[in-house]
Amino acid sequence: MSSVKSDTALSGDAPFILETQGEADTPHPVDIHVGKKLRLRRRLLGMTQSVVAGRIGISFQQLQKYESGANRVGASRLYQLAHVLGVAPGAFFEGLDGETAEHSELVGSLDAEGLRLAAGWRAIPDDRLRKAIAGVIAATRAASIAQ
């Protein structure tokens, strides 16, 4: 069962609503979301859990717990992770309110090959080359659908 708390000190005029979990063993949906974003970003960069964990001074098992949502990531640790993964800390919260959920679902469903393609895509500096490759992919997709 969840309860709702209000904290006006955080936002000034409007109350800040925080839903809490009633079950201590159940990860909060926000922790699960942040963990999925951590895992996705790490995998897009081709980094292992051991490498990321080592850079911030934790065990890879602890990082696994963050990525699964089993353990909540503190603000200072989230800041460190964001720095290592090359994103703003807020990036881990994108899609929580549904604004980019469709995009997140698509990216989150990529297999290992798709993640390698995404990482490779980011490494191509020439816009014209990326557009040409995107054209080949679109034509290939259209041809495979037509068959």
Image (spheres, helix red, strand yellow):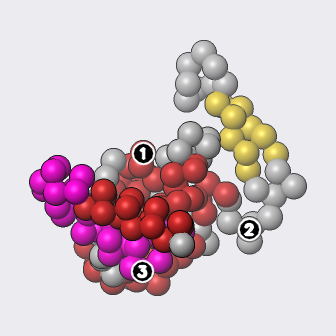
Give x and y (percent) for residue 129: 16, 57
Q: Nearer the viewer, residue 123 or 5?
A: 123
Crowding at mark 3 (Cα within 10 Å: few <14, some 14-19, many 20+): few
Is 27 located above or below residue 62 in the figure? above
Residue carrying label 2: 26
Per the image, is 115 magenta? Answer: yes
Q: Between 124 and 73, which is closer to the camera in this rendering? A: 124
Q: Which callout, 3 or 1, points at the residue further toward the start of the chain?
A: 1
Q: Which mark is residue 90?
A: 1
The answer for how far apart the CA atoms under marks 2 and 1 are is 24 Å
Q: As shown in the figure, which amino acid type bears the numbered disc 3?
A: Ala
Q: Which residue is mark 3?
A: 112
Magenta segment? 108-132
The residues tagged by marks 3 and 2 sit, at their Cα atoms, a distance apart of 29 Å
For image coordinates 76% across by 56% down, the residue present is 21
Q: Label 3's element?
A: helix
Q: Quadrant of the N terminus?
A: bottom right
- Quadrant for the C terminus, please: bottom right
Q: Is residue 23 left or right of residue 121?
A: right
Q: Amino acid at mark 1?
A: Gly
| N-terminal label among 2 and 1 | 2
Q: Callout 1: helix, strand or loop?
A: helix
Residue furthest top in the image: 13
Q: What kind of secondary structure does the magenta stretch mostly adopt? A: helix
